[in-house]
Image (cartoon, rainbow, N blue to C red):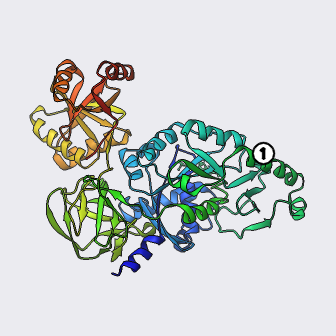
Amino acid sequence: MSQSALAKEVAKRRTFAIISHPDAGKTTITEKVLLHGQRIQKAGTVKGKKSGQHAKSDWMEMEKERGISVTTSVMQFPYANALVNLLDTPGHEDFSEDTYRTLTAVDSCLMVIDGAKGVEDRTIKLMEVTRLRDTPIITFMNKLDRDIRDPLELLDEVESVLNIMCAPITWPIGSGKNFKGVYNLIDDEVILYKTGQGHRIQERDVIKGLNNPELDARIGDYAQDLRDQIELVQGASNAFDLEMFLAGELTPVYFGTALGNFGVDHMLDGLVQWAPTPLPRETDGATVVAATAPSFSGFVFKIQANMDPKHRDRVAFMRIVSGKYEKGMKMHQVRTGKDVRISDALTFLAGDREQVEEAYPGDIIGLHNHGTIQIGDTFTAGEKFKFSGIPNFAPEMFRRIRLKDPLKQKQLLKGLVQLSEEGAVQVFRPLSNNDLIVGAVGVLQFDVVVHRLKSEYNVDAIYESVNVATARWVTCKDERKLDEFRRKAEQNLALDGGDSLTYIAPTMVNLSLATERYPDIEFHQTREH
Ligand code: GDP
């Protein structure tokens, strides 16, 4: 295809994910975002339902009907002149290392905060991950239909806890029963809130100009309060700055209620206007591949196994970095050195799992995987290189895994190493004993592993608790010092699934003592594949 046609496709795309603490409203926002993307409405699934809870169970029912839960993993929809890809980040019980890795495959993130609660743990953790790539962050303060905390205090908290500057784009007028709407500081207009419109796209009820007397007529005393507050806000907060936003240093902030479907579209306006188009990616040769580079390239950031033992298919999720995917094209899998023809890649258009004819940078396609694809794999159709920046993350939960039948040790190890290559879990083999320790960031990962060991490797395994609190990959520039460290700290050292040396610490205190005691050793929270 011509260079300008490719550039046009790239310019249209925005690929983002949502980060939030459980219950802040990610699912509800996703539904409203899709409503604005005109997809759910078309499918007629949410329309007419009275409560958010209904919508949610419909959603899950839909997943079940389609048989495999990749449907909500990637959603693509048009909004304004853009084509938006929203990558789902598993939350709640299904939280896993995939959640982290998905954040390395997007170009921007929407951070959703419950206005009554402020910044919560999970959000802090997920923000740390976005910092690896200085991903631009847009913020949505949710649940304005409830009494929230003082908005200025919320911004202060984001700034101090998450270390990112806030630039309010909209400002709330009241909250809870008295939520009247928001004032857009850039467009100088008030958008009034109507209740009971949660499942429809509403006409915006706009009053132009903060000093417009119509505002007093419509919201009474709130109008003057708003004027006073805006003066304060303009003095106390940052103005929006595109460059700082793109550098991940400043976040535009929107206020609204996902449940009431108010403000989500304001946020989407900001996203398509400011969020980056598909970004270049670095390779391990320290070169950079731009989205508009003519030949196809992409990397795998997630592998999803079907939990149904009758269907052993797994889907590898690939983020396209450059060029164009065309059905039937030949690509080169860099790690294995093999050429493969891909004629049945999947797309995940708004919940429909269908074969894709063509796809572009920023898009996610699914490759059928029969065990040959690993997390971090690069595929190219031109020059051969490997993308970097799709790491393993230090697990936070650990269990010792044991066999019911001790004769199957070899199979167990094989299964665990394969599952760790696929990113389902991490495995550690201590240097000083024959234990097998599995590490995860979410509990569900443990269940998935036992289930898959049984169904795919015919191994019955059980877990026992183990005294490990955290793990760090260790490296040292000085071979001699590393050897010495290996001798002295052997009790705490292990090899992971890829044979990388790892320090496993019984407590955080132990870890910090070790880092003090061995200043030449580097302790890493992530490991490149
Ligand atoms: P998630 O865990 O982040 O996906 O959160 P959900 O979208 O499932 O929302 C958690 C709960 O908060 C649900 O009961 C939602 O109905 C509710 N919720 C979400 N957004 C709003 C909102 O704007 N206002 C109110 N009052 N409740 C909301």
Q: Is residue 205 above or below residue 101?
A: below
- Residue 54 image offset from top left, x and y in percent: 57, 57
Compare residues 58 and 491 and report the one nearer the observer: 491
**Residue 333 visible in the shown view:** yes
- Residue 400 image offset from top left, x and y in percent: 25, 29
Quarter of the picture containing the N terminus is bottom left
Q: Quadrant of residue 315?
A: bottom left
The residue drawn where x is 50% and y is 51% is 247
Q: What element carries label 1?
A: helix
The residue drawn where x is 40% and y is 79% is 4
**Which residue does the numbered mark 1 point to in the structure image?**
232
Q: Is residue 194 left or right of residue 8?
A: right
**Residue 148 visible in the shown view:** no
Q: Is residue 110 left or right of residue 432?
A: right
Q: In this view, does 527 lie above or below 89?
A: above
* Residue neighbourhood size for the residue with mark 1, other residues' Cα within 10 Å, grouped as few (<14), some (14–19), many (≥20): few
- Residue 130 image offset from top left, x and y in percent: 45, 47
The residue drawn where x is 71% and y is 70% is 203
- Residue 483 image offset from top left, x and y in percent: 16, 25
Compare residues 384 and 341 and report the one nearer the observer: 384
Q: In this view, does 140 lie above or below 432?
A: below
The residue drawn where x is 56% and y is 43% is 164
Looking at the picture, which amino acid does disc 1 mark?
Answer: Leu
Q: In which quarter of the image is residue 524?
A: top left
Q: In this view, does 73 lie to the left or right of 309?
A: right
Compare residues 43 and 180 and report the one nearer the observer: 180
Q: In this view, does 427 lie to the left or right of 470?
A: left
